[in-house]
Structure formats: structure tokens, C-alpha cells
Amino acid sequence: MKNILLILRREYLVRIKKKSFWIMTLLMPLLISGFYALLFWGVFSSRELQRVSIIDESGAFTQKFKDSEKVKFEYLKLPLDSAINRLNQKRTDIVALIPANIMEEPKSLKIFTGKGVGFEIQGKIENIIQNEIRNVKLSKAGIDQKVLEDADVDVSSKVVVVSKEGEQKEQNTLASTILGTIAVILMFSTVVGFGMQVMRGVIEEKTNRIIEVIISSVKPFQLMLGKILGVGLVGLTQFGLWITLTFALTTISSSLLPSQQIAKAAQEQMSEMPQKDKDKIAKKVEQTPSDAGKVMQFFNSAKDLNIPLIIGCFLFYFLFGYLFYASVYGAIGSAVDNETDTQQFMFPIMLPLLAGYMIGLMTAGQADNKLLFWASIVPFTAPITMMARLPFGVEPWELILSMSLLVISTFGMVWLAAKIYRVGILMYGKKPTFKEIGKWLFYKG
Amino acid sequence: MNNILEVHNVVKRYSQHTALNNVSINIPKGVIFGLLGPNGAGKTSLIRIINQITGPDEGYVLFDGQKLNPQHIREIGYLPEERGLYKKMKVGEQLLYLAQLKGLSEKQALEKLKEWFIKFDIKTWWTKNVEDLSKGMQQKIQFVATVLHEPQLIILDEPFSGFDPINADLIKNEILELKEKGSTIIFSTHRMESVEELCDHIALINKSQKVLDGEKKEIKERFKTNTYNIQYAGELLTTSDDFEIVRTEKIADNFSSSTIKLNHGTPVNQLIRQIIDQVELRSFGENIPTMNDIFKMVVNETID
């Protein structure tokens, strides 16, 4: 036990002291919080006023375009050429030409701009014209304005998850899906990444020939376990730092834009508009993800997620998933003389990992997918695929079953790997085959 | 108990071949013991069993009278033929680590390391990465790692390979000093001149079997062919039943060198008396076989 700790400490310290460890550790939270900050910035700081000039040749849209905080409309009674001149002189940002026959050919609307037009503004202009054309056409068909206003309803839904105990909980599928997907990617890349580190470490010891010195002091099993645990601890350290740093940085970046201010901004935007438009905005909120309301909704529902449970489970599945695969990686490392010889063994080990990864990504959001369910029970794929299910809530018995199977098979895998490792580390000069490695399992001490 | 190590009827089989076939060796305390044998004879297998890297399929090993067990690991120091250290690790940290794996506390290890660093005058190496040292320097570090925990039994596999003559001498003196202090040294090598120089006892393993062992002096005695080399002026003719001339070589005019085989039971003085009657004797020496001769003789014999 003392030896395992000594080995663990060395493996841990050697890696912690590397520059690359700190670069990775610091870069990830910066990227995440940078992304987070960018999201806010994109929503709340693009408040540059856009001047839109309307040339209404049809004459049907007088007073239909109303200014908002972001857009100021003006009606021009000029020919297109002079309007475009104004564009060049930067006296306007966008020129929208509504041709006379817009009612017959709705696709003939043209928008001119000097520097490109935001999707949002384009959509806004199109929406107003589209609504107006519909109103006109429906009026012509004999439907009066009152009925039209009545018919303009907004349907939106909330997903409510009902548990067996009858507890009802609102759920945001988007937030859960995004979180699940991130967790799947993170789990896959860390299990593979740290597993490879174990393999390289084993190969290094073998090619360095220090292996013989070490195993004349400790048992091969102690060396293998110490190495795997040491590298695993590096992984946990990295996660710990990531979580802490990400939390700290996102707190800082969102305190630059306090949530009250965000809420106020969203409210102002709404109250500025007449009641009728409010509904439309609400509808748009559903449609365009870059809108303030959507972001608020997203973060609010993310708050409903059981983050401690998800993080706890993530760490558990990382630890055992990593132990499971790292011991395989370790065994492979022991069997070869250099990294190029590992190719033939990489495929069988990557296969279940990739399968879990693909299943996790493709079925993310489908919490009751049968394939996903089974993949999250089977130990080979469980560490990765369970991540896709966790944010949607997993029945305790499923979680317990999946975890116990993983723990049991991890012990089994470590035991098998140790048998290969013990023989492999002393074998030099020949490329082993699967058959030969199979034989090693039955060698006596 | 006079033997530090007793190997009793050890058999080690691998799937394709038998590496050790019923090998028994006794290694007395405080000697330098030469473990000899051609490549692939089974030396490394035996060393690995002594180091408890692998176990024997049959037979057993006694260390200081006790059956070999994990407690003995710290009583053994092993310098493998293929040297190796962690390249990216600092020399000092590495030696501390290896010493702790052998059961020393960090404090003990530091104290002992200090002595060695002063002795070898390598104080400046402490914070260097191993990869920045020359091969010879790395070998020195590895030697320190082998003996740092003051083991009772030190196993050196080709300890001089890779050393220049000056450093080889340095290591040789260290080995002798360790012996003085009471350590037993197993010395595995092909280089017979160092066996000649250092070893008290030897065992020769060939084709998985021990073919020869004992005290070096006694073995040489055993392999003596009762021949003598003489140089003389004049002409030597065999006129006696006491000896025969095996080979004569003319070195200069009226000056020759001969190898003479003395027939069994004839005293040496009688031979000399008979020779000086015939020629003017310039030199006379007994033909004692070198370890090299013995090695070749025994190995070739077992091949036939």
C-alpha cells in the first residue's frame, strides 16, 4: 500500500508539474466562460441603432413600420438610386424596396445594405410585410380586423415531467440536451486522453528499461495501480479546477451584466411595445435563440437541473470509466515496445468508446431512447452514455444498476489487465498478437 | 548460516522452453560471486527469481536461511544490464523515489544520498534532468540507486558496460569497498577479465543448467592441465617418460619456447632438473587456465 502511494505520488507530481497540464486546465474554463460571456454580449450589447429606409412603391405599408430600440424606420419618397446614394453617404444603414406588385409577388422585396444585414432585422421587415399582406388579403376575403386580432394567438408549451410520486417538474429540454452533450464529449475525451497517458507512461517505463529496477522493488500490480490512480487523480484535479474556475469566471462575467439588469432590459423591451406586439415578440422569443428572453429562460431552467447530482455522477463515472479503460490502455502499453505497435490494439479499445460517444451524441435529448437506455447500463458504454441521460433525470434503480455493473466490471478489468501487464512489461523484441496476449492471462506468477 | 543465498533445485519454464532446469547454487556471505554463462543460458531468469520479479515453477530460494519473501526486497540491490531511469525526472528526485520504493524514509534516503553525491563529486547534478546527463553519468546515478539502501546482496548485471576505463575503475573500487563492508555481490558478466580480477566464487550456467560452480581458485586447480611453459636456449629433446613436449616454437636463433605436459605423479622439480641438463633455461611457468579458457572449455563441452 505504501508503495502504491509512492508511485501514485510520483505519477501525480510529474504530470501536475508539466506546463501542458496548466495550460489545459486554465484554457478550458476561459473558453467556457468566454463562450458564456459572448452569449450575453451578443444579446445585450448589440444595441447599435439601425436606420432602415423604406421605399414603399406599393403604398400599402404606411405607418406599418414602427421604431423600436434597435431599429429606426424612415419612409423615403425617392427613387432607388438616390436612396442607395444615401446608403453610400452613410445617412442610412439599410434600404428596403417594396415594389408595387408586392401583393402579387411577395418574394420581390429587396433589401440593400452597405455592410450586411442582421438576420433579426431582415426577419423583422419580412414579418411586418408578411403580416400586412395577410391582413389585407384576409380583409378582402371578408374577414374583419376584430376577428383577425382574435385569431392571432400564440401557442407555446412547457414540458412538465411527472414522476411516479406525482411530483411535477418543469423541464427545459434544450438546456438538458446541451448539458448532456457537453458531458458526453467531456467524458469521452477525458477517458481517452487520460487512458492514453497511462499507456504512454507504461511504454515509457518499458522503453526506458527502468521497469526492471522498479519491479525489483515493487510488485507489477502495485506499479500499474499506482500509475493508473496517479493519472486518474490528475484528471480529478483538473475537473476540480475546471469546475471551480468556470464557476468563478462565469460569476465574474455575469456580474459585469447583473441578472437584474438583464431582466430589466428584457422588460423594457417588452413594455415599449403595444400589447399586440408583445405577443409577437413573445413568439419571436421562441423562434430566435439569440433573444434575451430565450437566454433568460435557458439559464433559469438550467438552474432547475440537479447540478450537484450531475457533477457527482460525472465524477463517479469518470473515475470508474477511466479505471476500466485505463487498465486496458495500461495492458496494451505493457505488451508493446513502442507507440506505433499499439495500432492494432487501438481499434478494439476505441470501438466501445466510440460507440458510446456516437450513441450519446445522436440520442441526446431522447431521454427514453431504448438504445441509449441499454448503452447506459452496459459497463463498456455506460460512463459516456449515462451522461446524455443524467440531465433528464434517471430512475435511481437504473443508476444503481449501471453503477454497480460498472464497479464490478472495473475490478474484473483491472484484474485481467494486471495479468497481461505482469507478463508484458518483461517481454521485449516481439510484436505480440492477440493470441499470445491471451496466453499471458494463464501464466503463473 | 554461511550462505546468504541458497538456490535449491529451481525450475523455470516458459511456454516454449525451459529457462532453468533444476539449478542449485549456494552463495556464501561476503564474496563476489560470478554468475557466468553465454547469452540465453538462463542467468537473467535466475536473477529475476532472486529479485522476486518472477517465481520459480519448482524448487525454492533461501535468503539468509529464510524462504525468499517480500521483506527481502529491501535487502537486495539490483543493477540490470539494460540501464534505465526516468529521463524527464530530476536526478535527486529520482534517487529519492527509488530509495523510498526500497523502503527507506525520505530522511534516511537524503542523508545517504548526500554521502554518495559528495563521494562521487556530483553535487551539481541534483537538479539536472536525467536526459541532460551523459550515458556514463547516468550509469553512475544508477549505480548509486542500486546500492543506496545498503543491501546485503547486490546483483550487478554487466556493471562495467558503458563505462570508460576511469569510471570502470571507480565502480570496481566501490564494489570492492562494498565487499569489505560485508555485502555479497552477484556479478553477472561475459567479461572474463573482470571475473578473473574480482570474483571469489563462480557458477557457470549453460543451456538452463548449472555446469560448474565453486571457489575460483579451486576451479582453476581443477582445470589445470599439468602443463608448463618454458623458454630456453639450446635444443630440448624428449628422452624421459616423465614429460612430453606438446608444442615448440622457435623464437630466435637458438632460442625456443615450449609447452610441456608433465606426466601424472612426477614432481615439478624433477622436470626442471631434467630440462636444465639439456638446455639453458630462461623462464619457467605453470600453465594455469584463465577463466576465459575454462568458460570456453565448459561451454563447448556442453554443446557437444
Image (cartoon, coloured by chain):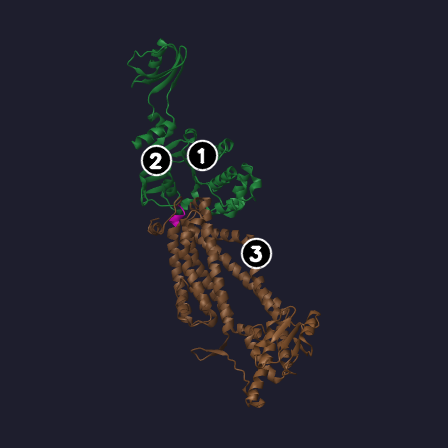
Chain colours: A brown, B green
Specify few, some or many for label 1: CA neighbours under 10 Å numbering under 14, 14-19, or 20 or more. some
Where residue B200 appears, as percent x and y from the top left, is 40, 31
Q: Which residue is labeled 2 in the image?
A: B205
* Callouts 1 and 2 on one subunit: yes
Q: SS class of the residue under badge 2?
A: strand
Residue B248 is tagged as none
Q: Between marks 1 and 3, how big is the CA–CA gap? A: 51 Å
Q: Between marks 1 and 2, how big is the CA–CA gap? A: 24 Å
- The magenta segment: A422-426
Q: Is residue A353 visible?
A: yes
- Looking at the image, do the residues carrying marks 1 and 2 touch, with CB atoms under 8 Å apart? no
Foreground of the two, A276 or B59? A276
Where residue B260 appears, as percent x and y from the top left, is 34, 17
Foreground of the two, A225 or A385? A385
The furthest residue to the left: B241
Point out the frontmost of discs 1 and 3: 3
Q: Which residue is labeled 1 in the image?
A: B179
Where residue B28 appears, as percent x and y from the top left, is 38, 35
Q: Say whether residue B65 is left or right of residue A29.
A: left
Residue at mark 2: chain: B
